[in-house]
Every structure is written in C-alpha cells, then in structure tokens.
Amino acid sequence: MFERIPPEKRVAAMIGLALLVSFLCLLVGLYAVYRAAEDRRQVSLLTDANRNQQEKIDRQSGQLLRLQQNFDDTLSQLKSRDELLARAGELQQQISRQQAQQLQDQKNKQELLQGVKDKIDGQLGAGNGTVFLSGSALTIRLSDKLLYGSGKSDLSDDGQAVLKKIADLLNGTLKDFDVIVEGHTDNLPIAKTLQNKYPTNWELSATRASGAVVFLIAQGKVDPNRLAAVGRGETGAVADNDSEQGRAANRRIDIIVRLSKEQATSPLAEEKKQ
C-alpha cells in the first residue's frame, strides 16, 4: 500500500521541515523584535507628549500665577490709591475749614476794627485827627498840634491823654494787634535854631515817632514786642505842601494797627492808588 520512502528523501524532508520551522521561528522572533521596538516607540511618543503637555501645563500655571500676582498688586494699588484719595479729601476738607475759619476771623477783626474806629472818632475833637480803615489796617492819624509844640518832640498834656486812651485800647480790645507808629512832617526846612538838635525833617519825624512809642511802653504798659517806630520825614505827604492847610495835614503821627504777624506797612500806598 505505501511505498517505502527512501532514507535520503526522508532526510531531505526532515531538513526541509527543520528549515521551515527555523524560518517560522525567525519570523516570530523578528515580529517580536518589531513589536518591542514599536512599543518602545509608542512609549517614547507618549512620554514626549506627556512631557510637552506637562511643560505646557507648567507654563500655563506660571502665567496664572503671574496674572494672580498682577491682580493682587493692582488690587493693592487701587486700595492704596483709594486711601490716598480719601486722605487727600480729608486734607482738602481741613484746608477748606481752616480757610473758612480764617475768613471768619478776618471778618471778625474787620468788624472789631470798625467798632474801634467809631469809638475813637467820638473821642477826637474836631481838627485833632482822623481814624480810617485802609485794607486790613486801622490808622489813627493825629495832628502834630495835638501832640507837640511847634518844632518840638516832647508830648503835650493833651497828646499824652490821647495816647493813654489809645494804649488802653491796645491793651484791651486791640490786644491781638501789632502797631507801627509813623512820624511825618511838611517839606519846610528845620528852623536854624533847632538844626543842632534836628538837622533835617527825618530826625524830627523819627524822634516824634520814637517818643510816642516810648510813651505807649512806659506809661501805657503796651508790650514793646508789638510796637515799631518809623520816621518818614516829608515823604509821606497826604496833602499839598504849597498851602499852610496842606502842610498842617502833613505834620502828623500815624498809628497803624494791624493783625499780629502781618506785614505792617503804611496804608499810604493804598491811599495814593485810590
């Protein structure tokens, strides 16, 4: 029934079978190597993708942190700005209140000076002097015939009485005011008999102003820190020196009352403007 296979054919068949098995094993091994390489490649791709994704997440996290920091800084600045604005508003309100108070104080002082003016007006006799408000200053203008003898700097009895009343006002109603006393003359030269004592009208006007101040301090008990004496000679004329009436008006003492620590200047400039 069966032919007997020669030994050489059996050997060849076995060798062929072995070769086939070896080839199959080689194919299986190569496939396994391929799969392993492919798996490693996929793992590498996934690892790179995960790394990139993580880096992206880290960058986004950093951006979020910076945005949060910027937001916090901006919020802090806004709070600081609001606080500064609130503080500035409070300061502005304080300044406004102080300005309003200063204006009210100034008004009160003006009213007080007006009241003093009216009071002194009633005490001065006709032709002895005048009292007027000029700006923020009250000026008590006294004629030389009330205060001194002709060419003299010694106060008369009537002059001392008037200055004593003024000292009482300076120590009472006008205690918060400073005073500057100005001496004025006409433009006539000093008489030769008096030139050894008063070479010019400057010396005479300064001596008269100083004498009034000394009286206010010594007899009137006025604080000397509030007083100043100025001799203006014939430079502060308020009338024409061509007539006796004008010269008489120029021979005078001006007692200028101003708020303490204000620049005490003569109201003559304001009078001339008017």
Image (tube, rainbow, N blue to C red):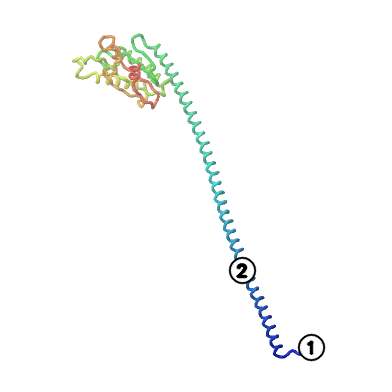
Query: At label 1, which amino acid type do we have?
Result: Phe
Q: Position of residue 115 (x, y in %)?
A: 43, 16
- Name above or below for residue 117 compared with residue 42: above
Tell me residue 274's x, y (percent). 35, 16
Residue type at mark 2: give it.
Arg
State the residue position of label 2.
Answer: 40
Of 240 and 72, the residue lying toward us: 72
User: Label 1 to label 2, Cα distance in Å?
Assistant: 54 Å
- Disc number for residue 2: 1
Secondary element at tag 1:
loop
Q: Residue at x 58, y 61 (%)?
A: 51
Q: Would residue 86 appear left or right of 234 to someone viewing this image?
A: right
Q: Residue at point 77% right, 89% down?
A: 3
Find the residue positioned furthest to the right.
Answer: 1
| Residue drawn at x 48%, y 30% as measured from the top left | 95
- Is residue 50 depicted above or below 93 in this figure? below
Q: In terms of image quadrants, where is residue 39?
A: bottom right
Classed neighbour count for the residue bearing mark 1: other residues with Cα under 10 Å, few (<14), some (14–19), many (≥20): few
Q: Residue at x 28, y 11 (%)?
A: 246
Quadrant in the picture for residue 2: bottom right
Q: Nearer the viewer, residue 12 or 187?
A: 12
In the structure shown, which secondary structural element does the residue marked by tag 2 occupy? Answer: helix
